[in-house]
Amino acid sequence: MGSSFNDEIVDTTAEIGSTGSADSRDEASQNSNNETDAQSEHTDQSDTESIQSTEPPKLKYSRLNKLPARFFNRDAVSCCYFHEEVFIFATHSGFIHLTRPDFSAIRTMKIQRSSILSLHTDGEYFAAGSIDGTVVIGSIVDEKDIIAYDFKRPIHAVALDKNYKSTKLFISGGTSGNVVFSARNWLGQRQDTVVEGGKGPITLIKTIDDLVIWTNDTGITVAQISSRTIIFHEKLPENFPRPEMYWPRFHQTDTDRFLIGWVDHIWTFRVSITSSNSSIISSAASSFRYQPDKKIALEHHILMEDTLIAGVCDFGDDLMILNYVKNSEPPELKIVDRTSFEEYSVDQVALNQKSNLGLNDFHLYQHGTRWFLVSADDCVIVQQYGIEDQLKWYTLRGEYLEAWKMSGLWLDKQERLNIGERQMKKLVAENDWQAASSFLSEMLATTGTEDPEYLESVVKSWDHWVTQFFKENKETLVLDVIPSTPIGDLFVSPEHYNHIFDYLIKNNEFEQVLRLAHKWDHALFDVESLRDKLEDDLENSRTHETEIRQLIVQLSLELDEMEKCVDHLIWLKDPDIMLFLDEHHLLLPNLKRLPEILSLSASGKPLDSESLSVPVAILVENSHEILPQEIVEILDSSGMDYVSFLYLDALSAHDKLLVKDFQDEMVKLYASYNRDNLLNFLSRHYNYSVEKAISICEDKNCISELVYLLSKVGENKKALKLIVDELKDPERAIKFVSESDDRELWDFLLDYSMDRPAFVQTLVIAASDLVDPIPVISRIPNQVEITGLHDALLQICGNTEMDRLLHQLILKIISSETMGLTHEYMGLRAKGTVFELDSLPEETLIHKSNKLMTEKEFLGISWKGSAATITEKLNHLAYIRRQTGR
């Protein structure tokens, strides 16, 4: 049979309410222009306690209103059972209602005449035990598959065997005090086996796999179903209340653990498997499947003071305990530590209650993440307070900071930003600008992976709140808060950054200006405006002038206004300024400052070729843009002759034509700064005035160069005198005379050097190679002592004899080679040439140009004489030569 019912679960927390005895539980409804309407979930009836609560509750409640109308209203619920696949509700009038876990009804029917006190199901069949003494077992889906068994005494507990479908075994017990194992025999008749009896009413029967657990006046007993033998018994403690008054509550915490809460005691048991000592199985026993022996061990026994346990379930790693409170007070839900049983929270749950109810009228069941607190008159669904519930709790109480913090990993970013905005308004309203500044940077932090719409909201929020800080003159609080880089492709208003720089410059906070200018991305603010303001305020920034000028240079570079950098780089004494001017083609506009720039390029070192190598190279490379004349004039006017020399020397090596108009000056510069290369310069260049060069060399006493110049203008004797008198170099004098190829000059050298023994000795030795030594020796004065003259004469004679022998050997070699070649030539002339002819002609043949032709073909006439003998042949040959003119 069935009846109509409401198919909704209605959230009735506000009606249910709760008062916290360990933690306050409340949510106060609030309306706000910035909040969406939300349904309040109450866990406290006291506004005072709500205000004092600092943490959200652990549990939330909603009233079950999805059962047939008669349940709870006209017919009190006596017991329930919550299976993974089916829920069963039973009443005191014998009705049961079967539903799926989503509360979709299977069916509702009346199966017994009075109160149903116990339910059990394996998902396929259900069993119901009634106070009328009957046990009804039926199929969940097949309403016709149902059977009732009458035990004549009230049934308090019933349980199906795990294999009921095949064994048809169930276990029951009640006021009779017997624990009865009931099954059908082969005739289909019920067959009962009493495992234990006579120890008081049975108040609980539960099964775990092959084990059955029951309770009676003596305590807790565990038996093995397969063997029908008791394997464990735990006695009740002394002074325990009458067991049948308060029925125990059972909960299986794990596959091998269960606990029983009874009155104010909790026992925790562990199931373990033990092996049999014997490996021999009798032939009779071998036909049955082997069931391993199981052992039960008591792990904990706890006394919970001030508690009457009406239900116990898992709550994560902790336990949820339903505490029955006397005197019609609402029951309490406690969350306790599983090991220490320390209470974490206590909720007093206000249920609909039409009459005084006892402990046995309350139940607590667990299904997944939901708990069902059931009384005779009401059912409340208990759920853990989720993160969304906590978020609502915080926001409704105005605790936006906590709401913002706890929602970081899961809430939509835009929604979380809205919560952050409320927190900012709260801080600003409290005039706590320091906290607002700190929170603002956290609230608007981004990673760059957010969607564009959200980033737009972030930028708008930055613009809004920074403006608020400025209005309250709190610029210093946003210096390190405002974004230092663009937000994705978006930018906070540049006006905010410009305002901050204006504020800092106005207050001479140049250290902060420098720090922020290096910290912030320059795309965020007006670079030109900052540069110009810093230049205008340079006089007020003496303490940080160096850093400020460096920043001005950096900003000008970004603006591509290179000319603006020059004055500051010169002030900064930047040694690389020459490179900068060259790179940006600024040498010509700043040419008048070249002496100062060159001094900076030397980095304080002396102006030498090493320190000026780079600047000089740059000037040379720019010779097509800057006329060398301009550079030389500027350098000379600044007294930088040496730099002019370096420049012109490098320019000459680069392109001689570029220095053709500076050769007179270069002679002077070489004579002053690089005398070693002066002669080389004079010999390789021809566009200088020899007269000026001679004058310079005379002033600078450049003798070798002067010798070259005098010889160049034909003053050989004057040049020779310098070699003899100044250089005192006889070898050079001899070489000079030899190169001039002037006999008169040679005689002049001999006459001019006869009073110089060193010259005479050298002349005597060299004479045999150059000229006849007799004139040299004959000019030696009688009284002049020539060191080494004897050896020199011997050397001359030796050289002469050696020359004679060499000449004879050479003549002999030449004569020998000549005779050899002559004989070879004569042989070749007398040698004939072999030709292969088809026939032997009688005429004389002549060989010419590798061809044979007759005498007549060659001469046009023939020899009239005889040519039989050798003499005649020679005469014939002479005739032919005469004819050919040979």
Image: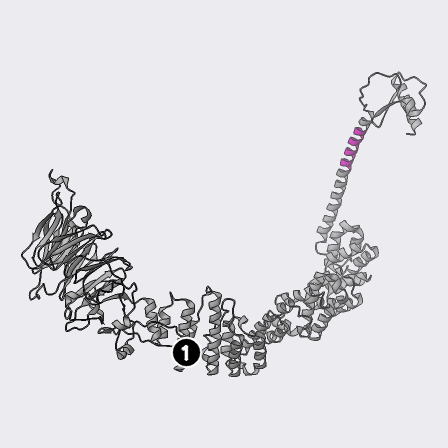
Q: Is residue 386 above or below residue 232?
A: below
Quarter of the figure with the C terminus: top right
Q: Residue furthest left?
A: 198
Colouring rule applied to residues: one colour
Question: 781 and 216: which one is in front?
Answer: 216
Taking the image as shown, residue 759 lies to the left or right of residue 226, namely: right
Across and down, in percent, residue 432 comes to 39, 81
Q: Residue at x 90, y 22 (%)?
A: 855
Task: Check if residue 192 falls in the magenta segment.
Answer: no
Q: Is residue 201 visible?
A: yes
State the image coordinates of residue 387 (x, y, percent, origin top left).
33, 67
The residue that appears at 40% across and 70% down in the rendered structure is: 416
Q: Position of residue 296 (x, y in %)?
A: 14, 54
In which quarter of the view is residue 678 placed?
Answer: bottom right
Q: Quadrant of residue 377?
A: bottom left
Indicate the amino acid at tag 1.
Lys
Which residue is at the front of the view, 550 or 628? 550
- Residue 821 within the magenta-colored segment of the rendering: yes
Q: Specify whether residue 295 is in view.
A: no
Q: Quadrant of residue 611?
A: bottom right
Disc 1 is placed on an element classified as: helix
Front residue (pair 576, 881): 576
Compared to residue 460, the image places residue 746 above or below, namely above
Stretch of the chain drawn in magenta: 811-825
185 vs 850, nearest the viewer: 185
- Residue 436, position in %: x, y? 41, 77
What secondary structure is the stretch in magenta mostly built from? Answer: helix
